[in-house]
Image: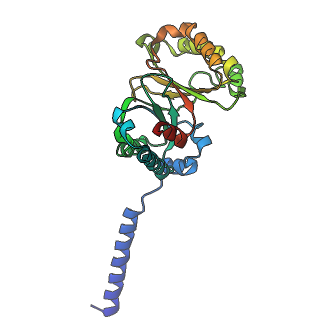
Amino acid sequence: MNQFLAGGILRNLLAGMVAVVMAVVMVPVTAQDQKAEALKMDRSKILSQPGVFGVFTTYKWLPEWYELPLSERMDYVSRVMELIKKHEDSVLVDVYLTAGLGGRSDFFFRIHSLELAKVQTFLREFRQTAIGKHVEVLDTLIGVTKPLNYITKERLPELYAGLASATYTGDVPRYAIVIPVKKSAEWWNLSFDQRLVEMKAHTLSTLGYMGSIKRKLYHSTGLDDADFITYFETSDLIAFNNLLTSLASIPENRYHVRWGDPITLGTILGPEKVVRVLAE
């Protein structure tokens, strides 16, 4: 065979092999990858976008935790903060202090991510830390954020405008409240228009409280035993009590088979401060 011809064949063969390898290694960037890169755990975006998973996990210290020396407990706190830092590009972690506000728990996590598996990885690694080995998991709730389903600009423009314009004007929130909700089969068998009527009454009863109470809804049907996780922040617990009383008195409440059980109330201090308070 001509030497130049053989050399050309070899070069073509090598080029083809390189192309195949590059095709295997260079995985196409998906729309989900682009979305993840765009949000990149930007707090304001993560907490306002649909399609974000929210996981709530509630913990109670095991008795042997308080038998450890204080210096050792404080060292373990720094390990948890390092873990939160390690995963900051994939999960957004908030920690709330519940000790003293209820007998069941001492603290809870609220974790957001575009991928539920990322939350699972963080929680698995947390359980491997010294603090994770000294707590009991009391409850876990899983949900995902979605766009408004009932009160939309097309269906109820005036109510939608009122909802969209309602802004929080209170002090920096001191308290967080988590309430899981499950609806009855009767609710899900209502027509959409019937449910829309109920949700219109629900929304009207809440509008007057939005200046003093922040709220966020997570959809849980099929992901958890609940159908919804309702999360609130406020510094005015009297207004919050009035809001819940108002919601309890509307017809929609007849379709609840679970409303709380438990209701989790905690203070908002920031992850490091909460963990340090608990370690003292």
**Going by the image, does 85 lie left or right of 120?**
right
Q: Is residue 103 visible?
A: yes
Q: Please determine whether, in this image, residue 87 is positioned above or below residue 239.
A: below
Query: Looking at the image, which is closer to me, 28 or 211?
Result: 211
Q: Is residue 200 visible?
A: no
Query: Looking at the image, which is closer to me, 149 or 227?
Result: 227
Q: Please determine whether, in this image, residue 181 is positioned above or below residue 164.
A: above
- Residue 127: x and y, percent? 36, 42
**Going by the image, does 12 lie left or right of 148?**
left
Name the residue at the bottom extreme.
3
Q: Which residue: 53% across, 41% down?
A: 271
**Residue 22 falls in which quadrant of the image?**
bottom left
Name the residue at the left extreme.
1
- Residue 236: x and y, percent? 65, 22
Query: Looking at the image, which is closer to me, 31 or 144?
Result: 144
> How many circles with numbers are drawn on the protein?
0
**Going by the image, does 275 lie left or right of 173?**
left
- Residue 172: x and y, percent? 67, 32
Q: Which residue: 67% across, 23% down?
A: 210
**Residue 186 falls in which quadrant of the image?**
top left
Q: Which residue: 34% across, 36% down?
A: 64
- Residue 233: x and y, percent? 60, 28
Q: How is the image coloured?
A: rainbow
Name the quarter where the N terminus is drawn.
Answer: bottom left
Q: Please determine whether, in this image, residue 19 is positioned above or below residue 161.
A: below
